[in-house]
Image (cartoon, rainbow, N blue to C red):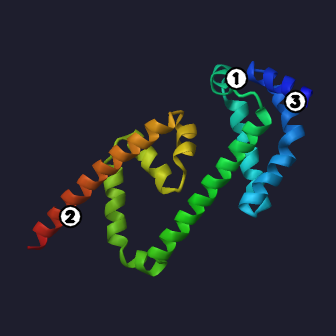
C-alpha cells in the first residue's frame, strides 16, 4: 500500500515509470471491477487500458491540478473506472434505443434525409464538424473532451450550439424543398 502511494506521488510529479508500477499492481483488480459493471472482460480491459493511456498522456501540471487533493488514489482509480463503465453502458443503451427506433429498413427509406443531414454537417465549420461527428459516432462528452483537449462543459456547450445551427440549416432546406415542390 505504501509503495503504491509513493508511486502515485511520483506519477503526479511526472514520473511515468511509476505509472507502470501502478499499472502492474492495479490493472487486474480494476479490470475485475470493470467486468462487474460491463459483464464483458474484453470491454473491461479496453476501459482500464484506456484509463492508463489517458493517465500516461496527461501533462504533469494537469495531474497535480486534478488529483493532488485526493488522498486515496486507489478509490480514485476505482471511481474513474466505474464512471467509464457507466458511460460505456449508457452509450450502448442509447445505440440500442436508436436502432430500435430507426430499424435498418426505415433508415434506407429515409436515405434522402440522411444525405440532407450529411450536407448540413458539411456546411459546418471544421471544429463543429469534428465535434458533431464524434457525438454522432457515440462518443460521450467526456471522451470528446479528452480527444479534443477541451473541458467537458465546453464540449456540452459547443454541442448545444452546433445542434442549434444544424436545426436552423435543416429548417431552411426543408422550407426550400417545400417551396420548390409547390
Give residue 4's mark.
3
Would you identify the image quadrant in which residue 20 lies?
top right
Q: Earlier in the sequence, mark 1 or mark 3?
A: 3
Residue 71 at x, y = what percent? Answer: 75, 27
Q: Which residue is mark 1?
A: 68
Q: Secondary structure at mark 2?
A: helix
- Identify which residue is drawn at 20% across, 64% down: 174
| Relative side of 30 to 128, left or right | right
Location of the N terminus (image quadrant): top right
Query: Please, is residue 7 above or below residue 128 in the view?
Result: above
First in residue order: circle 2 vs circle 3: 3
Residue 52 in sight in this render:
no
Mark 1 vs mark 2, foreground winner is: 1
Q: Residue at x 48, y 69 (%)?
A: 98
Q: Residue at x 29, y 49 (%)?
A: 164
Residue that appears at 80% across and 27% down: 8
Residue 39, located in which quarter of the rendered image?
A: bottom right
Q: Which residue is mark 2?
A: 174
Percent x, y of residue 95? 54, 65
Mark 2 or mark 3, which is nearer to you?
A: 3
Q: Position of residue 18 (x, y in %)?
A: 84, 26
Q: What distance separates the C-alpha of mark 1 from that of mark 2?
A: 52 Å
Amino acid at each position: 500500500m505504501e509503495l503504491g502511494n509513493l508511486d502515485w506521488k511520483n506519477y503526479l510529479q511526472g514520473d511515468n515509470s511509476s505509472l507502470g508500477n501502478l499499472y502492474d499492481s492495479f490493472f487486474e483488480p480494476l479490470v475485475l471491477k470493470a467486468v462487474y459493471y460491463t459483464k464483458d472482460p474484453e470491454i473491461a480491459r479496453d476501459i482500464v487500458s484506456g484509463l492508463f493511456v489517458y493517465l500516461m498522456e496527461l501533462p504533469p501540471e494537469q495531474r497535480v491540478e486534478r488529483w493532488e487533493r485526493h488522498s486515496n488514489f486507489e478509490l480514485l482509480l476505482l471511481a474513474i473506472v466505474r464512471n467509464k463503465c457507466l458511460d460505456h453502458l449508457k452509450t450502448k443503451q442509447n445505440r440500442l434505443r436508436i436502432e430500435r427506433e430507426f430499424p435498418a429498413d426505415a433508415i434506407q427509406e429515409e436515405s434522402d434525409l440522411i444525405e440532407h443531414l450529411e450536407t448540413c454537417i458539411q456546411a459546418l465549420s471544421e471544429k463543429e464538424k469534428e465535434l458533431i461527428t464524434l457525438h454522432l459516432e457515440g462518443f460521450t462528452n467526456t471522451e470528446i473532451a479528452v480527444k479534443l483537449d477541451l473541458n467537458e462543459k465546453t464540449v456540452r456547450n459547443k454541442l448545444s450550439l452546433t445542434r442549434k445551427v444544424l436545426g436552423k440549416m435543416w429548417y431552411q432546406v426543408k422550407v426550400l424543398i417545400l417551396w420548390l415542390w409547390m
